[in-house]
Image (cartoon, rainbow, N blue to C red):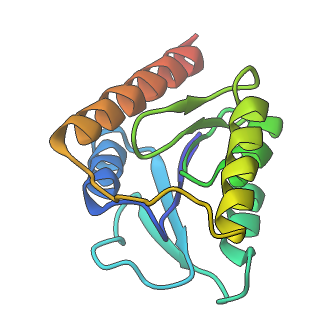
Amino acid sequence: MKIVVDSDSCPRLAREIVVRASQRTGIRAFFVANRVIPGIQGGTVFMEVCAPEPGAADDRIVELAEPGDIAVTRDIPLAHRLIEASVLTVDDRGRVFTKENIRNLLSIRNFVVGLAENGLGPERIAHYTRKEVKIFADSFDRLLAHRMGEIKR
């Protein structure tokens, strides 16, 4: 089992939670991005820098992740690919993606992208509050505990 993080847009506080969990449990964590993310390297934590081509980091994440691994991404199309590959997937705000919810979320995402492409998209406000950090930490810890419990059986 390993943890794979889509690091390009993952907030620092969420990355720190994953690093601490990796160090605490000994589970390898791979941070994948198109650029070096400071503070990611050493022990059970690895940084993978991909070519700056569209989709390169996403493709590497899908390549690295195996059934039963945990992935962190807010990229819904990437989450869809990971769910299809039986990878437990959560976004950096604590929303767990499942086979039951991913198609609906992908449909909503595609609709919003279509609006934005036509100049009608909603204004985005990128706040990452303590509340969101806690929700992510709780969701991530639950997935980790669940997965570790399965491994011990």
Which image quarter holds the C terminus?
Answer: top right
**Is 96 drawn above or below residue 50 in the view shown?**
above
- Please tell me which residue is depicted at 77% across the width and 60% down the height of the picture: 63
Q: Is residue 42 left or right of residue 150?
A: left
- Please tell me which residue is depicted at 48% across the width and 26% down the height of the picture: 143
- Please tell me which residue is depicted at 32% across the width and 42% down the height of the picture: 21
Residue 96 placement (x, y as % from top left): 54, 30
Q: Is residue 145 left or right of residue 34?
A: left
Which image quarter holds the N terminus?
Answer: top right
Which residue is outermost to the left? 130
Rendering quarter of residue 51: bottom right
Residue 129 placement (x, y as % from top left): 20, 46
- Please tell me which residue is depicted at 49% across the width and 85% down the height of the picture: 35
- Frontmost residue, 7 versus 108: 108
**Is 14 drawn above or below residue 86 in the view shown?**
below
Which residue is outermost to the bottom? 52
Q: Is residue 62 left or right of residue 23?
A: right
Residue 149 placement (x, y as % from top left): 49, 15
Residue 5 placement (x, y as % from top left): 51, 56
- Frontmost residue, 66 versus 38: 38
How many marks do you count on the picture? 0
Which residue is outermost to the top? 153
Rendering quarter of residue 36: bottom left
